[in-house]
Amino acid sequence: MAAVFAERPHRADASGWEEALRIWERTNAPEGCKVEIIEGIVTVAPPPESDHNDTADELQRLLYTVIPRDWGIYQTQGLTVPGRQGLFVPDLAVIPKKLLPRPRERRTADVARLIVEITSSSNANHDRIEKLNGYAAAGVPLYLLLDPWHSGKPTATLYGEPAGGLYRVLETVKYGDEMHLPAPFEVTVDTALFPAG
């Protein structure tokens, strides 16, 4: 198992983070767009395409068969990573319902038991680098990166065991192979069900 390393970017001060949050709150993006803060910069991504949505749907259907009734799977839940100047909206976040934020409240990403990001051609590096580092720094137990745009060879990579702001690679498979999600999920994911980019 290899550790994933990335250079830590320069972080703005607390007032820069607060300003980014204010801009994020006031951003009026077109319907379906995802507005996030990545490394202190407010970003707007276009709505995902059908293949992206199909992948999320297939995985969500599987996860609902193994999670407790008092957990949910969320597609539009904003989660903060203040130490990395981030407010991410994961493609899927599995979170115990009692840990969801109340109205006008923000939660840090560590409330999630699993976060899934599905890369898009336009912003794949955000998921591969900045979000990978952010979720590790936040201590999210499992991060599943579904990457149909990976060098023409779609892959699924499961990261876990966060420590010191880094993840370990638990498993990488090419689309078409099966991957095991460990406890608390204990389920096999058939990546052949996911459309390739």
Image: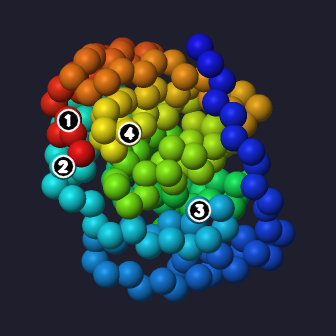
151 left or right, relative to 36: left
Disc 4 and disc 3: Cα gap in Å?
A: 21 Å
- Give the image location of residue 168, x and y in percent: 61, 23
- Could you tell me which secondary element the residue under label 2 belongs to? helix
**Residue at position x 44%, y 73% from top?**
44
Which of pointers 1 and 2 lies earlier in the amino acid sequence?
A: 2
Disc 2 and disc 3: Cα gap in Å?
A: 24 Å
158 left or right, relative to 67: right
Disc 4 and disc 2: Cα gap in Å?
A: 15 Å
Q: Tell me the quarter of the image containing the C terminus.
A: top left
Which of pointers 4 and 3 lies earlier in the amino acid sequence?
A: 3
In the rendered view, tell whether residue 66 sits above or below residue 46.
Answer: above
Which of pointers 4 and 2 lies earlier in the amino acid sequence?
A: 2
In the rendered view, tell whether residue 141 sits above or below residue 178.
Answer: below
Disc 1 and disc 3: Cα gap in Å?
A: 27 Å
- Give the image location of residue 97, x and y in percent: 42, 44
Amino acid type of disc 4? Answer: His
**Residue at position x 38%, y 39% from top?**
150
Which of pointers 1 and 4 lies earlier in the amino acid sequence?
A: 4
Q: Which residue is mark 2?
A: 51
